């Protein structure tokens, strides 16, 4: 499994991912082709990117969120095709992103809606504490 910068070739698999109602349940309504194109341009192809593609065996399986949250921390997250859920992929990606954040001397934050129990479970498993809310989102910060 590798994390890499997105390219314009990621448009079709990204649309497949972001148009899936199961994937988008806790994020926002499923994306149209146009909204996917805007997301890819704004978040995946920006400099620096806000999201990065995740490949396994040269196939796009989703993306990770990794960008500055504030001056001292980065936000991490993951969005994967449903057939990769519950198989340890999110755990491995979380480990990889925490490692990268620590090597950059950054603190780590995860945001999610309160109903997103799988993300909250993973955050707690990795030692994150809920430190408050940002609008409707709960904010989890990794204990050092």
Image: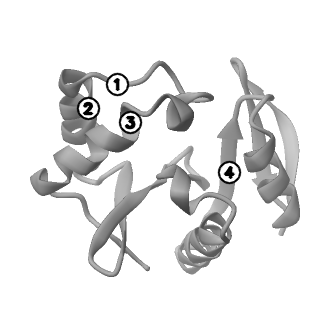
Q: Which residue is mark 1?
A: 31
Give the residue drawn at x 55%, y 49%: 71
Q: Residue at x 73, y 48 (%)?
A: 119
Report if the CB atoms under discs 1 and 2 are less than 8 Å apart: yes
Circle 4 or circle 1, nearest the eye: 1
Mark 4 and mark 1 in contact? Answer it, CB < 8 Å. no
Q: Which residue is mark 2?
A: 36
Contact (Cβ within 8 Å) of mark 2 with mark 3: yes
Between 140 and 71, the one nearer to me in the picture: 140
Q: Earlier in the sequence, mark 4 or mark 1?
A: 1
Residue at the disc numbered 3: 18
Whether residue 100 is situated above or below residue 125 in the rendered picture: below
Task: Confirm or deny contact between disc 1 and disc 3 (CB under 8 A).
Answer: yes
Q: Which mark is residue 109?
A: 4
- Image quadrant holding the N terminus, namely bottom left
Which badge, 1 or 3, comes first in the chain's sequence? 3
Q: Is residue 109 left or right of residue 49?
A: right
Q: Helix, strand, or loop for circle 2? A: helix
How packed is label 3: few (under 14 Cα within 10 Å), some, or many (20 or more)? Answer: many
Tell me the SS state at disc 3. Answer: helix
């Amino acid at each position: 499994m590798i994390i890499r910068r997105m390219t314009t070739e990621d448009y079709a698999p990204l649309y497949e991912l972001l148009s899936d109602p199961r994937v988008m349940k806790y994020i926002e309504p499923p994306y149209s082709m146009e909204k996917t194109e805007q997301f890819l341009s704004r978040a995946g192809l920006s400099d620096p990117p806000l999201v990065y593609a995740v490949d396994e065996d040269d196939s796009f399986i989703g993306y990770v969120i990794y960008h500055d949250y504030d001056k001292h921390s980065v936000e991490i997250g993951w969005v994967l095709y449903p057939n990769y859920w519950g198989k340890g992929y999110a755990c491995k990606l979380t480990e990889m992103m925490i490692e990268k954040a620590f090597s950059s001397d950054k603190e780590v934050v995860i945001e999610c809606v309160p109903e997103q129990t799988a993300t909250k479970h993973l955050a707690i498993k990795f030692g994150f504490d809920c430190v408050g809310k940002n609008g409707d989102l709960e904010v989890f910060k990794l204990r050092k």
